[in-house]
Amino acid sequence: MRKIKTTKGGVTAAKGFLAGAVFAGIKASNKGREDMALVASEVPAVAAGVFTTNRVKAAPVRVSKAHLKAKLARGVLLNSGNANACTGPCGIAAAKALAAGTAEVLGCATSQILVCSTGRIGVALPAEKMEDKLPDLAARLSAKGGLEAAKAIMTSDSFAKEYAVEVRAPGGTFRVGGMAKGAGMINPNMATMLCVVTTDAKISKGTLQNALHHAAERTFNRITVDGDMSTNDTVLAMANGAAGGASIKSGTTDHSLFLEALNEVCLNLAHMIVRDGEGVSKFVTVQVRGASSLQAARKVAEAIANSTLVKCAWAGNDPNWGRILDAAGYCGVRIREELVDIYYDGVIAVRGGTAAPTPKEKLVAAVTPDKFGVTVDLHQGKAFYTVYTTDLTEKYVELNLSE
């Protein structure tokens, strides 16, 4: 019997976690939709985080990284409608002020509050307007508020993204749940996304950080929509131990199950982000195998997944394998063209670097569905790497002409 099963509740599925949302009017064009969210633990929790590797980092990223040095955390304040990025010292001051205001309504230290923002870059955050809404936001916290919080952090997203699981482990039953947002500027490391994961498992801060890093590398750092990396990418995890089970130790069965559960939550949220990509119509899994090293496999996979020419071909149901082989050839990895095989959903398109005798109509049928896979076998080793990506349609341009 499977020890991990899906459950309802998203970011508040785990015991002792509350969430809520409120309208603050952060963006002028936002007419009444909630744009501030708060996820809070009823008891102090340990926290971990992974962030964008962009050298241009938003104020909330800088502040949250600093606050994660504290031993404990109580909550995460998130907003849509404004990224608070490239806003200088005023942006840092705004992020710190909102953390302090949230700490006051929750009755904890400022360092126990993490902050996340998403929206337009280079616009001052209306911190005073947001601070005025914090008491109301705290009053709306509820164990059933996960969906409202997930909706409040949406920008160009078309649906709220949440997922949760329950785990029956030898040391006791616990839950892992989360919410995320993301649709455009999606590319490792990481993507334009915010994510909060919660668990009522008892686990140390260091073990949680290692687990989150492990999960992010295999999920959020494997997705791309348009090849653009953001300034605000943040994945945060909090563990409050409210499930009451034994402490999870590295190397145990409980730890293995925790890693599996965390990976499942992150992978499902990551897939939702790709499926909801701006101006896309297809979800494509690109796997490169037979590479000489993991790094080589990754470079080839990401080159293919980010190729505008490849994506446009997919949008037109065109199995143009020449563009795939071209991308593999320019990514900087040594490959032997005469060894390469390419498959669309198991249907061979290229054998030994040249066209396979597969009828074109069969290849077209393989790339026409809204979900398919591409496999590139380099026949140079045993390493492999998988990336989750999309096509790109005319709608992507329309969505990004202005904001």
Image: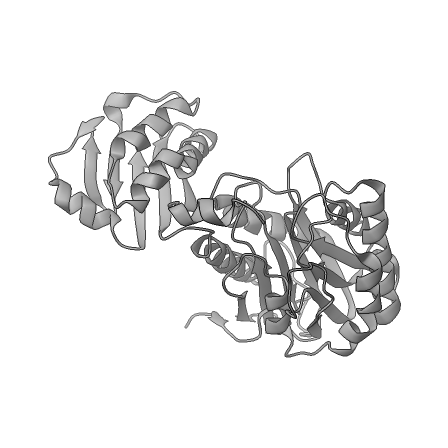
Q: Quadrant of residue 156?
A: bottom right
Task: Give the left or right position of residue 181, taking residue 375 as reference.
Answer: right
Q: Give the image location of residue 147, x and y in percent.
A: 59, 72
Depth check, front residue: 311 or 53? 311
- Seen in the picture, residue 365 relative to 25 is either above or below; the reply is above
With 325 as the anchor, is 53 left or right in this view? right
Q: Residue 340: x and y, percent?
A: 26, 28
- Classify residue 63 as left or right of residue 397: right
Give x and y (percent) for residue 378: 31, 30
Number of numbered markers: 0
Using the image as rendered, state which of residue 148 and residue 278 is in the foreground: 278
Rendering quarter of residue 250: bottom right
Which color scheme is applied?
A: one colour
Residue 379 at least partly seen: no
Q: Quadrant of the N terminus?
A: bottom left
Q: Is residue 302 visible?
A: yes
Asked which quadrant contains residue 23, the reply is: bottom right
Front residue of this view, candidates 134 and 269: 134
Residue plotted at (63% across, 79% down): 144
Q: Tell me: residue 170, above or below residue 29.
A: below
User: Looking at the image, which is closer to me, 324 or 69?
Assistant: 324
Residue drawn at (47%, 42%) of the image: 226
Q: Could you say where residue 61 lies in the image, as x and y percent from the top left?
A: 73, 47
Residue displayed at 54% across by 45% down: 185
Residue 27 higher or lower than 314, as above or below: below
The residue lying at 63 percent from left, 66 percent from top is: 152
